[in-house]
Image (tube, grey):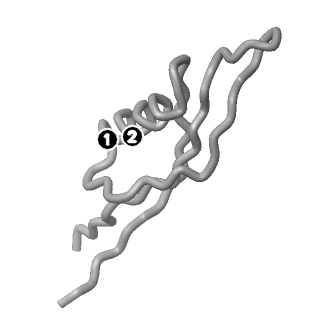
Amino acid sequence: MAGSVYKVIELIGTSEISWDDAAKNAIERAHKTLKDLRIAEVTSQDLKLEDGKIVAYRTKLKVSFKFIDDF
């Protein structure tokens, strides 16, 4: 019986609303092209500022998905 293998990638989601929404945007976009997403870990959050005002929230995530061999 073989064990499972997972690949980890880093994503950055953005939003004008919140850090949570930025993370959600990243995961929803990744789900369109990656199968079997498993775990997402928030590694950092930051803000984009213009004229002293918040214009964007950014959330950096490490996301894992199952690595599937075709052989």
Q: Position of 49 compared to 8: left or right? A: right
Residue 64 x/y as whole percent: 41, 59
The residue sitting at 31% across, 53% down in the picture is: 37
Which residue sits at x=38%, y=33%?
29
Residue that protrudes farthest toward the top in the picture = 51
Q: Which mark is residue 53?
A: none
Q: Position of residue 40 (x, y in %)?
A: 43, 53
Q: In the image, is residue 43 above or below residue 21?
A: below
Q: Nearer the viewer, residue 31 or 67?
A: 31
Q: Please report the residue visible at 57 percent of the width from the left and 38 percent of the height from the top.
A: 59
The answer for how far apart the CA atoms under marks 2 and 1 are is 6 Å
**Most foreground residue, 66 or 19:** 19
Q: Is 64 on the left-hand or right-hand side of 52?
A: left
Q: Quadrant of residue 12?
A: top right
Specify whether 25 is left or right of 69.
right
- The secondary element bearing badge 1 is classed as helix
User: How many numbered marks have been drawn onto this rendered protein structure?
Assistant: 2
Q: Which residue is mark 1?
A: 31
Amino acid bearing label 1: His
Residue 68 picture quarter? bottom left
For disc 2, the marked residue is: 27
Where is the C terminus found, in terms of image quarters?
bottom left
Split into 4 quadrants, where in the image is the N terminus?
bottom left
**In the image, what residue type sits under mark 2?**
Ile
Q: Which percent across, then down, holds residue 8?
A: 47, 61
Residue at 23% of width from left, 86% of height from top?
2
